[in-house]
Image: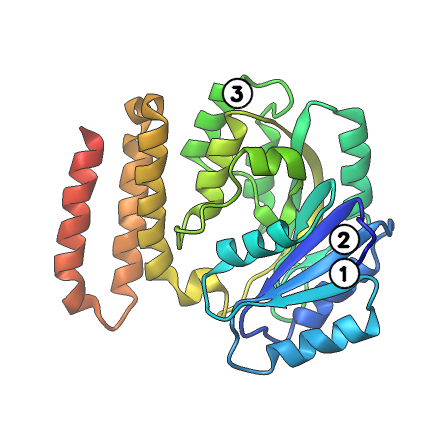
Amino acid sequence: MTSHHPVVEIVLPTFRAGPWLDQSVQSVLVQSVDDWHLTFVDDASPDDTVDRIRAWCEEHPSRMDFIQRDRCGGAAAARMTAVEATNSEYIGFIDQDDRWKPEKLEHQFERFASCQSAAAIHTDVEFIDQTGRIIHGRAQEENQRRATIDYRNLDAQLMSANLYRINTIRIVSSMVRRKQFLEGGGFDTTLSGGEDWEFWVRFSAGFGIDHIQKPLIERRLHAANTVSVRRYQRACGALQALAKIHRENPHLRSHSHTVRTQRLWDVIRAARRTRRWPKLALRLAQLFAHYLRLTL
């Protein structure tokens, strides 16, 4: 690792990096502030991903490093590997197929300076297609939902309850203070779905969050998105996240019927898209039984 501790460490997990990795890295390189360092974490990709990462690190040896995991553990585990191996005041996250606007870090640094109570700051988003063109109107509902929440002044328990009902914070738009991130427990690496949702519910109960009402990230939609390729596995993982949230936040159970129902339907819809649908009947029966226990 570099001997210089930058203000922000940018974490980029990779697995079978697709054709857009270079665009993601370029969007970091053109940031309007330069006190950053980028750490790639490859999650045991079986293809040429590491060679591509190594080329970037050789071209920018003082700005980039990479870690190669020996077995695939998922995005949460990859991100935590990088966080634990680095040292910076802030941590930012970007994915291998998304892009940042050039002023993203600058806006977040400015907001942290003006809002000392914030331990995390996130932004609005835009959606882009496979070619990088903006999908106009696609993010409007999501961004409008964020605009209705008073992130800076809302009581911590109410904020946690809001994020429990619907998570309005995207990991790739966020920057967090390292100290509070670690104090809050970081990402739960045992979850294979819903880990970002569970993290923000837990984190917001103890630390302040602020929001910049500008679309400073571009989230790419394509058929190879993890959420699409592993839809069933991640839907089941979100149920595990739900169970954990209920164990640690009993007060949320009283108004969680809609959330529980939505998570269960997510599993059913995802299962119906797989060719294994007839074989999933037993698993779905188990999930219904689990759902009933959660309602007690």
Q: Are marks 3 and 1 in contact (CB under 8 Å)?
A: no
Categorize mark 2 by other alpha carbons within 10 Å: few (<14), some (14-19), many (20+).
some
For marks 1 and 2 on the same chain, the one whose residue lies earlier in the sequence: 1
Q: Can residue 180 be seen in this view?
A: yes
Amino acid type assigned to the residue bearing label 3 in the image: Ala
Distance between the Cα atoms at labels 3 and 2?
30 Å
Please name whichever residue, 70 or 23, is drawn nearer the observer in this view of the structure.
Answer: 70
Circle 3 packing at 10 Å, graded few (<14), some (14-19), many (20+), is some
Viewer-nearest of discs 3 and 2: 3
The image shows residue 74 at horizontal and vertical percentages of 47, 60
The label shown at residue 198 is none
Q: Could you tell me which residue is drawn at 48 percent across and 20 percent down?
A: 158
Residue named by callout 2 = 101
Rendered image: mark on residue 156: 3
- The residue located at (34%, 21%) in the rendering is 251
- For image coordinates 66% across by 70% down, the residue present is 21
Circle 1 residue: 27
The answer to whether marks 1 and 2 mark residues whose Cβ atoms lie closer than 8 Å is yes
Q: Is residue 172 left or right of residue 65?
A: left
Instruction: Give the position of the C terminus as an image quadrant.
Output: top left
Badge nearest the viewer, 3 or 1: 3
Q: Is mark 3 on a helix, strand or loop?
A: helix
**In what element is the residue under mark 1?**
helix
Ranked by sequence position, the earlier of labels 3 and 1 is 1
Amino acid type for the residue under numbered disc 1: Ser
* Of the image marks 3 and 2, the number of the one nearer the N terminus: 2
- How many angstroms separate mark 3 from mark 1 (CA)? 33 Å
